[in-house]
Image: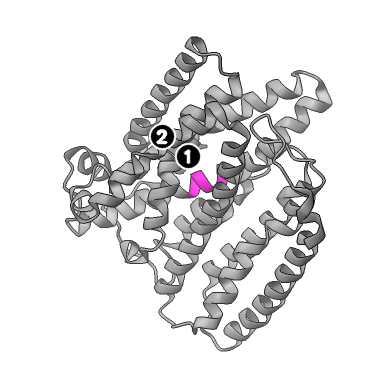
């Protein structure tokens, strides 16, 4: 799959013939950024097949899914973040304090992972869900900018509201029943929250935004100023977000979303870096060498190798400490992953990087 998509991503020059309204062009955006949502059910289908056939115990299947997704796509996507942060002289010079504060996150992760593991996992899952949705918001902003037709502020609020609320009506309900497990723990849901009826509130808010979005999108199409890719992206995201929490194992379910998110991000960063190179904004020789190639494969393999180092560190931590397997995995992975989240909240306020 990655080889095939890398072939699609290859271009004879840096970013030729960009189509109005699309980040690159329809034949690139659709399979790589939007319709790649077809990847979301894959982890669930693997777990379901294992359960039905009995070929592997459920806990072993979860470990297999986590390791496979992290190794093949999750790791490469988070390491690609350094192409516009630590490996970018302009970023380090312009935002020295922001870059320095990122280095404190591994220390926080290690402390929480050893002493307050449940708190770490709860914090991670909360931030992860917002991070995934923030990427969709960023893409919608980029499509809005590429569309050329200005949207009023209320229209953007409706888009953002629908993107941010679709995951939580069913998700909060399942959390309140304590039916979810992630990282080997059940995320806490304090009893005092039950009196607030959060699932019903989340459902009502989501329903309002959904109706408003349908109405204003219909109006935009009638007026000839709608963005087709933005509409497809938000519509597909809404279906995925609402349906994903219907299962029980949050590890498996979220890995489905993570697969789509990571896949999008790899190609998004590839396109962004190609545009940065065209504008002369990349000063690092390694990044320039990887990005100027017509094939994305060396770029991907570089970050796949970095992921391999992360796997070795995880195995080392597991062997020399008394931490459980889940703790070893999350302490190491989240030390890097939370820095990725941290830097992306900066990136996702910069739609100009794709202009």
Residue 1 belongs to the span the image colors magenta = no
| Highlighted magenta segment, given as a residue range | 260-264
- Residue 1: give x, y in percent of width and height: 52, 37
What element does badge 1 sit on?
A: helix
Graded by Cα atoms within 10 Å as few (under 14), some (14 to 19) or many (20 or more), the crowding at tag 2 reads some
Q: Secondary structure at mark 2?
A: helix
Residue 266 is drawn in which quadrant?
Answer: top left
> Which is more toward the observer, 321 or 86?
321
The residue located at (75%, 40%) in the rendering is: 180
- Work out which residue is located at the far front of the displayed protein and give it: 192
Q: Which mark is residue 106?
A: 2
Crowding around mark 1 (Cα neighbors within 10 Å: few <14, some 14 to 19, many 20+) is few
Q: Quadrant of the C terminus?
A: bottom left
Please tell me which residue lies in front, 98 or 139.
98
Q: Which residue occupies 55% across, 80% down?
A: 155
Viewed as shown, does residue 206 lie left or right of 336? right
Q: Are marks 2 and 1 in contact (CB under 8 Å)?
A: no
Q: Which mark is residue 4?
A: 1
The answer to whether residue 262 is magenta is: yes
Q: Earlier in the sequence, mark 2 or mark 1?
A: 1
Toward the viewer: 309 or 192? 192
The answer to whether 207 appears left or right of 124 in the picture is right
Q: Position of residue 310 (x, y in %)?
A: 42, 25
Q: Is residue 343 visible?
A: yes
């Amino acid at each position: 799959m990655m080889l095939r998509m890398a072939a699609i991503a290859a271009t004879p020059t840096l970013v030729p013939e960009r189509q109005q309204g699309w980040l690159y062009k329809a034949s690139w955006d659709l399979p790589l950024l939007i319709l790649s949502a077809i990847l979301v059910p894959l982890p669930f289908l693997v777990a379901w097949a294992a359960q039905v056939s009995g070929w592997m115990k459920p806990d072993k299947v979860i470990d297999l899914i986590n390791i496979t997704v992290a190794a093949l796509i999750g790791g490469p996507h988070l390491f690609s973040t350094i192409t516009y942060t630590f490996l970018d002289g302009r970023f380090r010079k312009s935002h020295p304090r922001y870059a320095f504060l990122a280095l404190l996150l591994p220390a926080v992760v290690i402390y929480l992972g050893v002493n307050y593991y449940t708190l770490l996992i709860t914090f991670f899952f909360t931030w992860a869900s917002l991070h995934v949705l923030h990427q969709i918001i960023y893409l919608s902003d980029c499509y809005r900018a590429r569309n050329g037709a200005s949207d009023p502020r209320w229209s953007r609020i409706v888009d953002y509201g629908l993107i941010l609320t679709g995951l939580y009506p069913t998700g909060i309900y399942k959390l309140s029943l304590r039916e979810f497990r992630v990282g080997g723990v059940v995320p806490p849901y304090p009893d005092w929250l039950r009196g607030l009826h959060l699932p019903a509130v989340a459902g009502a808010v989501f329903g309002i935004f959904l109706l408003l979005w349908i109405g204003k999108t219909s109006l935009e199409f009638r007026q000839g100023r709608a963005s087709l890719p933005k509409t497809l992206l938000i519509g597909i995201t809404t279906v995925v977000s609402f349906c994903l929490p219907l299962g029980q194992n949050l590890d498996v379910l979220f890995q489905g979303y993570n697969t789509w998110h990571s896949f999008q991000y790899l190609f998004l960063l590839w396109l962004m870096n190609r545009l940065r190179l065209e504008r002369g904004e990349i000063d690092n020789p390694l990044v320039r060498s990887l990005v100027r190639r017509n094939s994305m494969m060396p770029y991907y393999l570089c970050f796949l190798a970095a992921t391999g180092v992360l796997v070795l560190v995880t195995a080392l931590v597991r062997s020399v400490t008394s931490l459980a397997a889940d703790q070893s995995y999350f302490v190491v992975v989240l030390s890097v992953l939370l820095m990725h989240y941290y830097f992306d909240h900066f990136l996702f306020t910069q739609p100009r990087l794709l202009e």
